Image: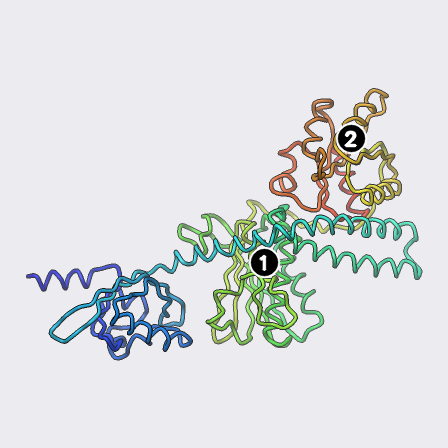
């Protein structure tokens, strides 16, 4: 009776139970232990403990385990390997046994892989947050400098006409500055302030444009497959382009800039217990599949770590930034490998309804009226003055919020009100944009305010209407973007 009870407990336990001799050979394994690692009982008994260890860990872990059994100092956690090569983390309970067959070891293994995955995600987030404190400060100052360069170049291009050597040189300067703007975006993304400014995004168009741009000077062939009726995503198009650029570039480099990449996208619904702790709901799943050497198992858990890279002259930030962007969007990014190559799967929250895609044109929209600009940087104020003059507006300027409120009151007293105000969100040692808007709303509940910044913590830039703003413009910007932002606010007023 007692033996039958013990056998029933052994066979029905949810944890893996292993009986091992002091040489590491398996004597008996329960069904849960077999299922945990994907082997049959016969396969396990025919081998030893090394069968369940990663090759690079096997001998060291094997010898350490045998020593611990003899000395009674047991390892509480261990990384092991399923038959299909995937990682399994187990929590160990180990007890020595004295039997007629001699000294044996009872090992109870509990699968804690999901818990380790969560711990790993938290560690990545902490690393990115630490880097972000430094990155955010650098990006803020750099953005203000770029605002002066990009803004003045765009004004100069508009004044010099469409042709000529000067126009060509200005175009080259603008290209270089816009590439610097992309670098600033990367810094902002890893900072706590690089929150996505969401809008409806045509995923198929964005993914295809990004992939073609990255691969145009390589020998890589790329095929695209998009589900009919693919939903739009709620995403920041600039940040999402960055994700796709990084993943496609990584895939191309893995294949030596030759070979074939497949890009697929489809609609998926995630239920309870979805991948990487995703919330239940509708998502757009983008899969980027290369046919290179794949990801070595020993580094598969580190591909999204900041500064981790296997390439020369690489920062190790590309995939870490992509991971950060996707997480901030409420999605997930998963890297998988096989003998045929690597697959990066990106889950993005889907928009409720599909809207017609409208590409943004770099046209100049002129207007008229008085505009008040508040910015603490003199370079930004001077550049904005040139833009507003070109666009046809009459402008006044303030270096901080207190001065902006004073000028707004004076304009109302003189019956010459401002049609709109543009407020810099962050003013060191002064009243910033949000506090300034609160004061202006006390004076004039109908004030039309545009929030301007190179970055912001959510939800001000990404949910500006909730905070009382009528529009948003992200630094650095060109005169065309600036004119459209103003026109959008003033047109609503009319």
Residue depicted at 53% across the width and 65% down the height: 303
Q: In the picture, which quadrant includes the N terminus?
A: bottom left
Residue lying at the far left in this picture: please name it: 1
Tell which circle, 1 or 2, labels the residue nearer the N-terminal end.
1
Q: In the picture, which quadrant includes the C terminus?
A: top right
Say above or below: 339 vs 233: below
Which tag is nearer the camera, tag 1 or tag 2? 2
Q: Nearer the viewer, residue 376 or 199?
A: 376
The answer to whether residue 413 is left or right of residue 41 is right
Q: Secondary structure at mark 2?
A: helix
Say above or below: 18 vs 351: below
Give neighbour class at mark 2: few <14, some 14-19, many 20+ (Cα, 10 Å).
many
Residue depicted at 78% across the width and 51% down the height: 146
Position of residue 492 measured from the top left corner of the image (x, y, whole percent): 74, 33
The answer to whether residue 318 is left or right of residue 294 is right
| Residue linked to disc 2 | 404
Position of residue 352 measured from the top left corner of the image (x, y, whole percent): 55, 45
Q: Which mark is residue 322?
A: 1
């Amino acid at each position: 009776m007692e033996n039958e009870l013990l056998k029933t407990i052994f066979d029905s336990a949810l944890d893996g139970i292993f009986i091992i001799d002091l040489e590491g050979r398996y004597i008996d394994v329960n069904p849960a232990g077999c299922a945990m690692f994907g082997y049959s009982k016969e396969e396990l008994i025919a081998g030893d403990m090394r069968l369940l260890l990663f090759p690079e860990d096997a001998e060291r872990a094997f010898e350490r385990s045998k020593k611990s059994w003899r000395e009674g100092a047991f390892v509480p956690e261990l990384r092991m390997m399923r038959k299909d090569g995937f990682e399994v983390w187990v929590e160990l309970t180990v007890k020595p046994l004295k039997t007629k067959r001699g000294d044996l070891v009872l090992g109870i293994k509990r699968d804690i892989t999901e818990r380790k995955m969560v711990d790993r995600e938290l560690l990545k987030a902490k690393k990115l947050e630490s880097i972000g404190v430094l990155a955010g400060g650098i990006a803020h100052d750099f953005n203000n400098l770029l605002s002066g360069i990009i803004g003045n170049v765009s004004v100069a291009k508009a004044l010099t006409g469409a042709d000529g050597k000067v126009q060509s040189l200005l175009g080259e300067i603008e290209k270089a500055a816009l590439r610097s703007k992309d670098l600033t975006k990367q810094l902002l993304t890893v900072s706590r302030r690089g929150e996505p400014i969401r809008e409806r995004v045509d995923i198929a168009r964005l993914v295809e444009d990004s992939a073609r741009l990255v691969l145009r000077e390589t020998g890589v062939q790329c095929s695209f497959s998009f589900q009919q009726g693919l939903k739009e995503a709620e995403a920041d198009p600039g940040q999402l382009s960055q994700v796709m650029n990084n993943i496609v570039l990584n895939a191309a480099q893995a294949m030596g800039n030759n070979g074939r990449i497949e890009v697929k996208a489809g609609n998926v619904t995630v239920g309870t217990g979805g991948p990487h702790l995703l919330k239940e709901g509708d998502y757009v799943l983008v899969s980027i599949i290369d046919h290179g050497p794949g990801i070595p198992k020993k580094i598969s858990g580190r591909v999204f770590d900041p500064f981790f890279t296997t390439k020369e002259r690489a920062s190790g930030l590309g995939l870490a930034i992509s991971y950060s962007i996707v997480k901030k969007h409420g999605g997930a990014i998963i890297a998988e490998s096989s003998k045929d190559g690597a697959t990066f799967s990106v889950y993005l929250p889907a928009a409720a309804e599909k809207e017609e895609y409208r590409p943004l044109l770099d046209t100049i929209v002129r207007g008229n009226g008085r505009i008040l600009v508040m910015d603490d940087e003199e370079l930004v104020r001077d550049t904005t003055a040139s833009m507003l003059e070109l666009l046809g507006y009459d402008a006044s300027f303030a270096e901080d919020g207190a001065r902006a409120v004073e000028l707004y009151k004076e304009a109302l007293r003189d019956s010459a009100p401002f049609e709109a105000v543009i407020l810099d969100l962050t003013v060191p040692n002064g009243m910033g944009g949000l506090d300034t808007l609160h004061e202006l709303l006390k004076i004039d509940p109908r004030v039309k305010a545009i929030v301007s910044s190179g970055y912001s913590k959510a939800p001000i830039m990404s949910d500006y209407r909730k905070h009382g703003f009528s529009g948003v413009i992200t630094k650095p910007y060109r005169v065309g973007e600036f004119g459209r932002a103003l026109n959008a606010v003033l047109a609503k007023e009319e």
